[in-house]
Image (tube, helix red, strand yellow):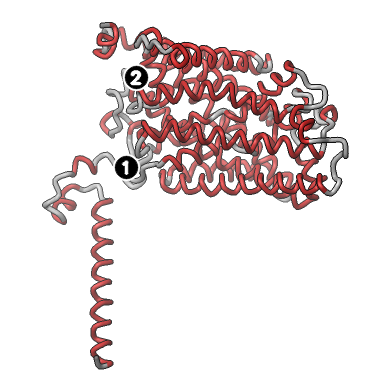
Amino acid sequence: MRLHEVAANGFQIVIALLLEIEGLILYSFYMKRDDRLDYEDYYDGYDEYDEYEDPQPYFLSARDLIFYCLAFMTPAATTLIYGGAQAAAHGALAGSYVVALVLIFLTMLSYRRLGRAFHEGGSVFSYAGQGIHRRAGLFTGWAATLFYVTIASAFFMIGAETATTMAKVLPYTFWFVLIAAVSGVLVLLGQRISSLAVTVIVLGVVGITAIYILVCLMAAGKGAGPDEVSTGSAFAGKDAGFGTVMSGAAIACLSFLGFDSATTLTGETDSPKRDTGKAMAVACVCAAALFCFQALSSAIIMPDYEGLASAPFIAMSEIAGVAGGVPMQTLLSLSVIMASLGVGIAAITAASRMLGIMVNETPMGGSRGAHSSDRGLLSDLLPETGTAPLNVIIAFAVAVAIAFLIPGKDFVLAFDLARFAGMMCFMIVNAAALIYFWFKRHDSVYSRSLIIPAAGFLASLWAWISIDPHSFSIGSVCALVGVIIIAALFLYERLTLGPAPVDIRDEDNAA
């Protein structure tokens, strides 16, 4: 073949590729436009326009859900609570994390079984609503939303405080606004972008945690820690008993809160019945391994737990300085800032989804599972991203407001409020599993229908009542507000709409 023929053929191929690219661009343009006439003029043969009206740009996989759960169960939480938890456990925090995993795993099994039964609705709202009663579902949704916004507030404050310590040139307010604003904007940009951001952040935090563990072990091998400390003593402590291990486990349970965030995303999950339970189980086991090794390696370097109580929030940073110097301390602080951003994204996402679910289930919000613009502002979706912008803005604004209303930037109070709400959700979900499978479905398998949910309820109750009394009082006031709101909705429903219709599924279960 001659040279000019080769050039001509190559030119034709290039022209064909350009035309294909142009066609794809035009196709994408018309697919994204919310104009039915232009869309039908472009492609009259397409008869599935009704599916386009409910935009769903990205379906989450099990991997995406795992990273969302890990964003809540971040290893940075251990960095923050290590000093106080290790002192409470008398040096046996690694063992306390194992106990906490067992206790949390009981509740996770209740979540998993309810998720398989109600995978179409999803979320603790549906689990409690269909397992116990619709108004119990509303209260649980209120508690879950409280947990999401308070945990976001806590990490916004933590990230800003850590960034201010690292870069003292810029004030606390600047870092707070930056971390909070970036979290909110990434959620508004849609599930595809926010999922990618969460994945990158979680991988970064896990990588820094792995470096920290490795540096501590290498430093211990070079004689940085006391010679008499062994792996066994660092795991179980020197004078720790059952009571101290359980005290540490009560604090360690805080690190596992948020694994249930995957349930709020069932409407955006590719296969919720299969992937949601799998993601929660894998995330819990991976997080527990990280927490345990992180606490174990820290205890090898500094086994004296009595001195940690005086500086509980910077204890791990001091250990990082002993093991790896200033570079390791800087990396650990960076992981806290990254984790603050990841928790902010995941928490605002979960809170906005929960808000949308609850609004669509109230008498003023439309029918079950509705997500269309004719049911109110809180159900409007952006066609380009599939997100409900007003829900995201409300969740973001409440999280920021809580952070500014808490006196003295006391993120410990925000943590305790989050634990109050999270453990309350755990108790209700375990009760829902017990009531639905044992009393309504009459499942004769005692272990899964009676023993596991009852044990999960008692474990959650124990962790719930061990919260600081001051935080418990404030959390009780927040819970009372939820009860008042639900009572007002009930009165509105009865006075305006009349008695609630009988659920056919309840009649079938009764039969």
Q: Are marks 2 and 1 in contact (CB under 8 Å)?
A: no
Q: How many marks?
A: 2
Q: Which quadrant: the C terminus?
A: top left
SS for tag 1?
Answer: loop
Mark 1 lies on residue: 56
Q: Residue furthest left?
A: 45
Residue type at mark 1 is Gln
Q: What residue is shown at x 87% (from left), y 39% (from top)?
A: 226
Residue type at mark 2 is Thr
Q: What residue is shown at x 37% (from left), y 26% (from top)?
A: 116
**Marks 2 and 1, Cα distance to the nearest angstrom?**
23 Å
Say which label, 2 or 1, has the lower sequence index. 1
User: Camera-side residue: 478 or 209?
Assistant: 209
Q: What residue is shown at x 55% (from left), y 35% (from top)?
A: 72
How dense is the environment of label 1, judged by Cα within 10 Å: few (below 14), some, or many (20 and up)? some
Mark 2 lies on residue: 362
Residue 6 visible in image: yes
In this rendering, the answer to whether 223 lies above or below 145 is: below
Q: Which quadrant: the N terminus?
A: bottom left
Q: What residue is shown at x 59% (from left), y 36% (from top)?
A: 287
